[in-house]
Image (tube, rainbow, N blue to C red):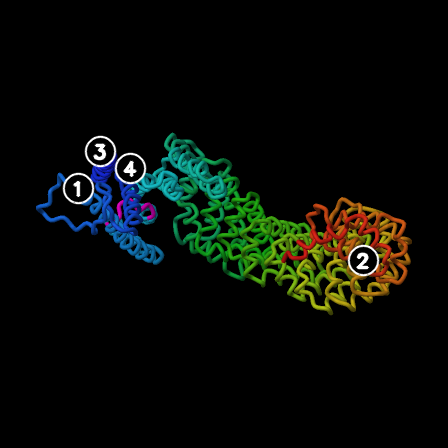
């Protein structure tokens, strides 16, 4: 028996020797992947040893207690199995300890590198990351961070090497592929760059938006290079238009000529900009800087009292920009990134010279035709001045130009970048409000566009909160409603849009004061006599959202006969109208006793409410059960339901699988009220095992 145990112990020892020998060889390997795997295995081995050392040291050779092993001396006998194992295990522990210390040091260098990077000292950042890698050669983040710093230093080949090492540390490193894609793009390796970004999408599909933007940059850069190659070939081949473009740009670069000279040259150049080749030659031969740096042209732009020639020169330059930028994204980018262009274009929009104003508006319209162009405008122009310029255009221009300006604003407002800007710039909302507040002088079409922009902006929760908090916004809406009520047929679309905006604003009920709720409810009640179904529905929608804010508003609304109107709404049907109508009835009956009496009087035997309990829309069902429960407080009302299946219906709703919590809660509450006022319902409840069902609904009450 002892011999068998010795054999097993020997086999175990030999196995450990093999494992640790393999680890030692792996730790000394020149292959990075092999070394990494060996390190991982060594750490596991050390952890196992640490766990074992929590117990008293034992020997498995003779099963007797011994003291912890001592550090072997130089004269130790390596042939002893226990001693040999101890040496190897100690070596693994020491390696793990050194790795832990090195990792801490590497992290410290990483933080220093990040600080230097944020300060723009990329060379120092590289030094810190390099020091960190000396401590820990398999730290992926140090490679990707250093690659990013190399890209900033335009040392793209070094960045690629670091990205490859990062991928050896983690083959699914999206940061490595991202930086590698940027480096390849800078080196004009377009195919390789695309592969890197496509690999990111394979690893993490959630990065679709970022990958799409990066791929667009690759495609755009490749397109630009091809354009420039073709343009150069045509210039070298002596194509007349290409040579003329180059010569005209050289002529325009001559300083101190009279405005008429530059006007003629610009007009000739504009006529040549008929295809991509000439547009590209304009760009590659410094056309934008030649125009922008020309002192005569610049003076004509900023000078107030221009003579006729100077006015023509300004308009000619703007038309040249249109021709150069037409369907050419790179030229659009270069135009908008010219010095002072962020202020110049808004300034030209408000020029007192009509031709300059119209040409600038046409240029802006061209720039905003595509999403890329709109993003360029949002990123590079002064949006506050641009918005003010457009609004000024609306007030002083003809209807066609005013519509064009508002259409430009509409297009820009659809971009997330515009919404982000508005979130932190309340002045933008005030600028839009200036149009609505001057509704008497604004064109109906531009009013409608302005309301549409504000309605779109109000779909953003942060902006909606700003708008709802701003009393001027509500006052502007009231002014529009008054204007529309003078001639509903003529201003129907404006009234409809205004009510839609007010519906969005009323979602922020916490921002609505009692006084404001009362004012809004009065104006909405006045519209409930309209014969226009759309106006009626939206007025009821606003009313349903503001009534809970004010007891007085509820009382005034009920006294004005709203219960009868909402009953008619419900009888007419229609999901949206029914939602608003039953919500109004639920709110009014919940707050105001006369409302309960009025519903009980108008809905004989509650036939209408019972029908609503069978609706597919859970919001309608939840409010219908609440309204019915409120009406049970009217003396004698409960007796109308004795011959119905109301108990069975409410039990089904209380214990059913409705997603709306209000359905379960309101059904249970209504059952309780029925049983309280009429004991005969208790008998029905017991027969249907209702107590058990109601107990099961308690889980909904416990929910926060």
C-alpha span from label 1 to label 3: 22 Å
Q: Which residue is mark 3?
A: 3
Task: Give, as a single range, the part of the protein colored magenta.
Answer: 135-141
Depth check, mark 4 against mark 1: the one in front is 1
Residue carrying label 4: 33
Q: Is residue 71 magenta?
A: no
Secondary structure beneath label 2: helix
Q: Secondary structure at mark 1?
A: helix
Residue with the mark numbered 2:
629
Q: Is residue 446 visible?
A: yes
Query: Looking at the image, is mark 3 or mark 4 earlier in the sequence?
Result: 3
Between disc 3 and disc 2, the foreground one is: 3
**If you read the primary sequence from the N terminus, does the residue marked by circle 1 or circle 3 appear first?**
3
As rendered, which of 273 and 545 lies closer to the eye? Answer: 545
Residue 370 in the image: x percent, y percent?
55, 43
Query: Label 3 crowding class (10 Å Cα cut-off): few <14, some 14-19, many 20+?
Result: few
Toward the top, the furthest residue is: 237
Q: Quadrant of the N terminus?
A: top left
Q: Find the distance from the CA under tag 4 to the CA under tag 1.
A: 27 Å
Describe the element under mark 4 as helix, strand or loop: helix
């Amino acid at each position: 028996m002892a011999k068998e145990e010795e054999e097993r112990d020997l086999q175990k020892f030999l196995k450990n020797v093999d494992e640790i020998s393999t680890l030692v060889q792996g730790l000394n390997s020149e292959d990075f992947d092999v070394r990494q795997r060996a390190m991982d295995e060594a750490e596991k081995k050390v952890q196992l040893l640490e766990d074992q050392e929590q117990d008293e040291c034992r020997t498995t050779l003779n099963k007797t207690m011994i003291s912890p092993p001592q550090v072997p001396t130089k004269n130790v006998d390596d042939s002893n199995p226990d001693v040999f194992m101890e040496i190897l295990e100690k070596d693994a522990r020491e390696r793990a300890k050194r790795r832990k210390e090195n990792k801490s040091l590497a992290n410290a260098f990483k933080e220093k590198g990040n600080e230097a990077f944020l300060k723009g000292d990329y060379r120092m950042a590289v030094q810190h990351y390099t020091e960190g890698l000396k401590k820990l050669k398999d730290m992926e983040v140090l490679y990707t961070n250093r690659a990013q710093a190399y890209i900033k230093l335009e040392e793209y080949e070094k960045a690629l090497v670091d990205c490859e090492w990062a991928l050896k540390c983690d083959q699914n490193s999206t940061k490595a592929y991202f930086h590698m894609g940027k480096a390849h793009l800078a080196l004009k390796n377009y195919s390789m760059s695309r592969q890197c970004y496509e690999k990111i999408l394979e690893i993490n599909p959630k990065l679709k938006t970022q990958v799409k933007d990066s791929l667009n940059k690759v495609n755009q850069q490749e397109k630009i290079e091809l354009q420039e190659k073709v343009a150069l070939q045509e210039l070298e081949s002596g194509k007349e238009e290409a040579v003329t473009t180059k010569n005209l740009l050289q002529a325009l670069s001559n300083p101190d000529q009279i405005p008429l000279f530059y006007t003629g040259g610009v007009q000739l150049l504009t006529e040549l900009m008929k295809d991509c080749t000439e547009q590209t030659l304009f760009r590659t031969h410094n056309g934008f800087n030649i125009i922008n740096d020309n002192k005569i042209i610049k003076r004509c732009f900023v000078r107030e009292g221009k003579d006729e020639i100077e006015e023509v020169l300004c308009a000619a330059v703007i038309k040249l920009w249109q021709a150069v930028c037409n369907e050419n994204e790179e030229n659009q980018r270069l135009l908008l990134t010219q010095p002072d262009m962020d202020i110049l274009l808004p300034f030209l929009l408000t020029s007192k010279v009509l031709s300059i104003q119209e040409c600038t508006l046409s240029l802006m319209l061209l720039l905003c035709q595509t999403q890329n162009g709109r993003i360029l405008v949002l990123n590079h122009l002064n949006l506050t001045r641009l918005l003010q310029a457009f609004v000024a255009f609306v007030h002083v221009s003809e209807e066609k130009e005013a519509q064009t300006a508002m259409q430009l604003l509409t297009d820009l407002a659809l971009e997330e970048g515009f919404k982000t800007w508005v979130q932190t710039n309340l002045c933008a909302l005030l600028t839009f409000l200036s149009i609505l507040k001057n509704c008497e002088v604004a064109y109906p079409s531009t009013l409608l566009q302005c309301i549409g922009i504000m309605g779109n902006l109000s779909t953003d929760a942060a902006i909606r909160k700003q708008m709802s908090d701003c009393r001027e916004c509500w006052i502007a809406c009231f002014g529009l409603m008054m204007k529309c009520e003078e001639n509903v047929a003529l201003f129907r679309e404006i009234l409809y849009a205004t009510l839609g905006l007010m519906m969005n604003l009323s979602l922020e009920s916490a921002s609505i004061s009692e006084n404001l709720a009362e004012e809004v409810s009065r104006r909405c009640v006045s519209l409930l006599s309209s014969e226009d179904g759309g106006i009626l529905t939206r007025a009821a929608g606003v009313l349903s959202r503001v009534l809970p804010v004010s007891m007085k508003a509820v009382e005034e609304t009920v006294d004005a006969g709203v219960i009868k109107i909402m009953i008619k709404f419900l009888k007419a049907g229609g999901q949206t109208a029914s939602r608003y109508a039953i919500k109004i009835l639920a709110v009014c009956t919940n707050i105001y006793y006369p409302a309960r009496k009025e519903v009980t009087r108008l809905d004989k035997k509650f036939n209408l409410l019972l029908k609503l309990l069978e609706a597919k829309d859970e919001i309608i069902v939840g409010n219908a059960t609440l309204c019915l429960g409120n009406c049970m407080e009217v003396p004698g009302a409960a007796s109308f339901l004795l011959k119905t299946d109301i108990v069975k219906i409410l039990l089904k709703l209380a214990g059913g699988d409705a997603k709306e919590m209000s359905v379960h809660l309101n059904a249970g509450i209504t059952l309780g009220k029925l049983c309280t006022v009429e004991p005969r319902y208790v008998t029905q409840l017991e027969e249907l095992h209702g107590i058990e069902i109601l107990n099961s609904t308690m889980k909904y009450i416990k929910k926060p």
